[in-house]
Amino acid sequence: MEKRKGVLLDSNGMVRAGLNDLGLPDWDFAVASTVEAANKVLAGSHPLVGLVAFTSPQSWSPRELESLIARHDIEWIAILGRELLHNQSLAPMVLRSFHDFHTLPLDRDRLVMTLGHAHGKALICRSIVEQDDEIGRYGMTGRCPKMLQLYRQLDKIVTVDAPVLIGGESGTGKELVARAIHHHSERANGPFVAMNCGAIAPNLIQSELFGHERGAFTGAHQRKIGNVEAANEGVLFLDEIGDLPLDLQANLLRFVQEKTIVRVGSTERVRVNVRVIAATHRDLSRAVAEGQFREDLFYRLNVLHLGVPPLREREQDIALLATAIFKANQHQKSPQVKGFSSEAFRAMCGYPWPGNVRELINRVQRAMVMSESKLISAADLGLPSSDVDASGQTLDEVRSTVEREVIESSLSRYQNNVSAVARHLGVSRVTLYRMIDRLKIVL
Ligand SMILES: Nc1ncnc2c1ncn2[C@@H]1O[C@H](COP(=O)(O)OP(=O)(O)OP(=O)(O)O)[C@@H](O)[C@H]1O
């Protein structure tokens, strides 16, 4: 049988010697005497379990150690003298950040069991992460019907070279979609140049787009290539196209039609080969009807149209997105934070998300840093808690919701000590483990 891999952080070799004496034939521990060395081991051989030996409360810098623990998705076990268990600075950290602890002297049977449990748990976590790669396409997270439709549209759009107009509220992922089109199209090796037409002073947009010659205007000390030329052979992404002033719309139309530009202060026409992808949160056809956007430019840009749905219409993707954001930001979370409570998931699903995915990212990132519990709550996300709403749920669903809440809060209260929780809830450990499995509660 292939040996299970672990890392042992041990500054003076004391626990290493003890482990050797125990003889654990199923385990192969790489020993690191510093946090930096442990980081290297973890990056190279991906063990699933880490042991940290504490000979005193000051064995390791808490900041360094907590950052090591937060960075790597493995289970940690603290090994320490019984007298350190009540140390005011060490004990809270051990309870918060470690899967379990083991007191010295090492007890072979107990250690084998603890290691086995930690290894099993890490394996399950890793398999969940791997399955999650299937949660979207084109670098996007989401598999609700509206996102599946978007992927099907993208499948076609990436095979052709026509202009695209992307509509959707702010923060829905329009730029992400534009980058995906570029990345999966024949222009992938060319540049992707993004420009926000709403964020540049109107008097500068002309030169930002088309560039200028030296001396073209006060302050033009040298020739500057504009974004259109910079995107040659690639994609020019024009965000907030609805904010482009009318006079510049005429210049843009000329470039889109003729595929040439003239730098400000020059008379020379320069040929360019650029695919234009424009985006707007405004209703451009309405802007056309109101005379604020040129109709001819609208038709030139709107050859292919994509609408990115607001987050409130992707309710079944919210938990997926929140979890993906959580995983992507593991390195900057508070070490004890392990995931979301079901109350938090419910609150996220009931919230209208005016700032869409961008707002979700901000709220989750903030909660990951600020939460003081193991599971992020609705309050940590700054969202109103929606109480259990039984309407529309079957009896089984309501029961599962309640069971999950009771078990999660008891686990949190007893620091994941399954025996204590089983005693508290009046069920056997086996029954409790079965319920934990069925309800997919992460320990
Ligand atoms: N489906 C998704 N999966 C993962 N991340 C997403 C998804 N949609 C959006 N995001 C992320 O949300 C953030 C906002 O997305 P993006 O900037 O593309 O939105 P936008 O619609 O262009 O916003 P704006 O109109 O304000 O420019 C980015 O960090 C982006 O990576």
Image (cartoon, helix red, strand yellow):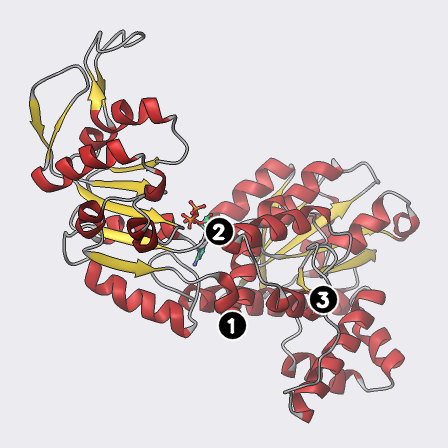
Q: In the rendered image, which residue does mark 1 sit on? A: 316
* Vertical order, 64 against 215 (above or below): below
Residue closest to the far front: 290
Of the numbered discs in the image, which one, if any, rests on residue 45?
2
Q: CA distance from mark 2 to mark 3?
A: 21 Å
Of the numbered discs in the image, which one, if any, rests on residue 114?
3
Residue closest to the far bottom: 395
Q: Quadrant of residue 134?
A: bottom left
Report the amino acid beneath label 3.
Thr
Residue 302: x and y in percent read 22, 54
Report the amino acid beneath label 1.
Gln
Which mark is nearer the camera, 1 or 3?
A: 1
| Cβ–Cβ under 8 Å for marks 1 and 3 | no
Residue ID at (19%, 50%): 163
Q: Is residue 319 visible?
A: yes
Residue 352: x and y in percent read 58, 62
